[in-house]
Structures are given as C-alpha cells and as structure tokens.
Amino acid sequence: MKVLIAGGGTGGHIYPAITIGKALLEKGAQVLFAGTRKGLEKEIVPREGFPIEFIAVDYFPRRLSLRLVRSLFTAMKGVREAVALVKSYGPDVCVGTGGYVAGPVVLAASLLGVPTVIQEQNAWPGLTNRILVHFVDKVALGYEAAANSLSRRDKLVITGNPIRPEIATITREEGAARLGLDPHRRLVLITGASQGARSINRAVSSAFPKLCRLDAQFLVATGSAGFEEFLARLPGGRPGRPVLGGAGRAFGNVWVVPYLYDMPAALAASDLVVGRAGAISIAEVTARGLPAILVPYPFAAENHQERNARVLEAAGAARVILDRDLNGDTLYDSVAGLLQDAHQLKAMAEASRRLGKPEAVWEIVALIEGVVAGAKRRA
C-alpha cells in the first residue's frame, strides 16, 4: 500500500502524521510525506526517516488584503504542484493531519479519485478540515466533541489521537530510572510544551519557594529559549546542581530542564501534569491516566486549546486555569490542593484513564486500510 501523508506547520500536525506513518510502515506500507519548506516538517520528517516532497502553500489572512491576493496565487500554484505530486507518486490513499499543506494535497487526491482520510486532533476542528470533510472518504476524530462542528456525520469515526506506543507501555520505575528520579516519591511534571511557555515559567518561578516545601518532586521543562530567564528569576541566585547529564539544574526537590527529550519517561514517572492543552499532549496524558492542571495557550487558532481543556474538565480529569489568571499563587494553590487531596487526585486519574485511547493509532490505520479496501471493491 502506497500512502501519501500531508500535514505540517506545527508539531501538533506533524507528530500525529509521523506516528501514523510509523504504524503504517509496521504494516508494510510505503509512505511519502508532503509538506512545505516553511513548516517544521522540513526538519522533523527527514529526521524521523521519511522521504518528503515540498509544495507551495501560504497562510490565508481572514480579511481582504494584498496578502490575501498573494496567498490565493500561492494556493493555486500549490494545487498544481499537489496534483502533479499525486499523479507522479500514485498513492493508494492520501492521509491529511492538518496544517495548510493538507488542504491542497488532500483536495488534489480526492479530485483525482484517490481514497482520502483526514485526522482531526482538536475538539474544535481547524478550518482546513472543516472544508475537506466535504471531499474526503473518512474523518478520524480525536475528540467526540469535534463531531458537533462537522457535517457529514456518516464520514466521522471517533478514534482518539495517535500517540507514540512507548507513552503507554513504559513503567513508572523505568521512567524514573531513566531520569534519575525517585520512583517512590510523587512527581509533578510542569511543561509549556516543546517551545516552553513564558506565563507558566513565570508562575513557577514566583511559586518556587513554596513549591520547594511541598512533599513532592517537581520536573520543570522551561523550553530552551526560557531556561536562562527562568534561572535568573529564581530567588537566592543559587546555581543548583547539575542533573540529566548536566542539561538541567536541581534545587532540592525542583528539577529544571530546558527541554525534555524523554517525555515518555517523564509521563510514566508523574502523578500530576501541569501544561498547555495541545491535542497530542492531552492524548499522552490521558493514555497514562494522569490528572492535569491545564493552562490553554490563549492565542491558539480559534481558541481550540481551551476547547480541548474544557473536555477534560467536564469529564473530571483536569482543572483549567486560563492564561490571564495564571500566577504564582493560583498555580501553587491548585498544585498543593491536589497533592493534599489524595481522593480527588485519584478520581481525576480515573477520569483521565477513561478518556485515554492508547491504541488510537491502530484504529486510524484500520480506518485507512478499510477505505483502501472499499475503493478496491468498487473498482
């Protein structure tokens, strides 16, 4: 089976595509990616071992402007390039995971009679997928709530979001050992996602003296760009001791790192997660059955991170603090309150586990295979 996968721009679209691509490889498929030279996919996809072809795609402003006219010309060029790519590669199926590149590639595949599947990660579908739903064969939804915003219910399948298999399989003891943490002591993981989050970093640095007094370990991932600023804001000017091969610094029970290269280990060792509400991050948290304090990124397209977070909040799996309300006091009160309420923490963990879909990628692969099989039967 030859598969063309289109997804790009941000990690939230790229990593689901890579997870699906790797699962398809395990099933013996041949996989080619389509992306743009402007998105993160130009670096991430080749690093993961996949071939990639590039087409021209540009951001579409929501208002009439010269930029919009330029984007329309770029889009027409991108569609022509997408048609040429689909014709030259000859895929059995085209899979879109979002981002601007998915639009022209999936549309071209559909118009050329190639079976198509799109995967929507968020509780509020992106504009591209809201358009593509009219052209594709099937839509794999990360959240049941997304179905309320999409027409053609007959095409929708709730699969959950694809995550790396190791996220669900690594044990707590193994995760703690890989990071050098104590597996018998509670761990709070605080992360602003891959790029870090200044508001979260500043709230943690403000709450730092009180966090140091809590009976728990803290692992704080600041993002590479925010690491030095975070250390500079800590009271007392202590240098801390080197941890994790010297990449991070430890201040008693609080470990600070610029980037978490081993997120599976960190999640496996954790009892509570504080972070943003990106769809894949949430999928990983719920696959582990972890309670969370979510701080949605306020500038996410169409506020989709808050919509994601509210799904978990409504299920009893998370508490939500809006970015504008986040400070040292609100962060500390939420963390300390949960650590001191074992019953509540357990109830949130159970609710999180009920939402988790650790096998989602295989449901998506089965959906893709089914679309291809159906097309062959009709041929």
Image (tube, rainbow, N blue to C red):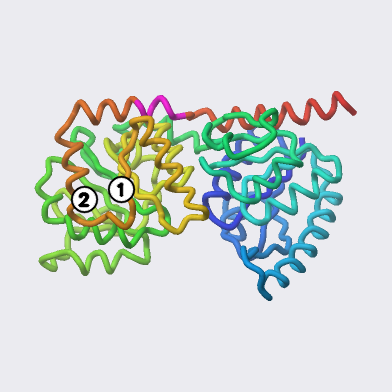
Q: What's under tag 2, amino acid-wise?
A: Thr
Q: Nearer the viewer, residue 150 or 230?
A: 150
Are the residues flagged by discs 2 and 1 in contact, CB closer than 8 Å? yes
Residue at 21% over, 50% down: 330
In the image, the segment drawn in magenta is 351-356
Residue at 33% over, 62% down: 198
Which label was assigned to residue 321?
1
Left or right position of 356 against 134: left
Pointer 1: residues within 10 angstroms few (<14), some, or many (20+)?
Answer: many
Q: What's under tag 1, amino acid-wise?
A: Ile
Which label was assigned to residue 131?
none
Residue at 57% over, 41% down: 19
In what quadrant of the picture does the N terminus appear? top right
Residue 288 is drawn in which quadrant?
top left
Magenta stretch containing residue 353, yes or no? yes
Residue 376, percent from left and from top:
85, 28
Q: What residue does disc 2 label?
A: 330
Left or right position of 131 against 254: right
Q: Magenta region's main secondary structure?
A: helix
Residue 5, percent from left and from top:
69, 46
Residue 253, percent from left and from top:
16, 48
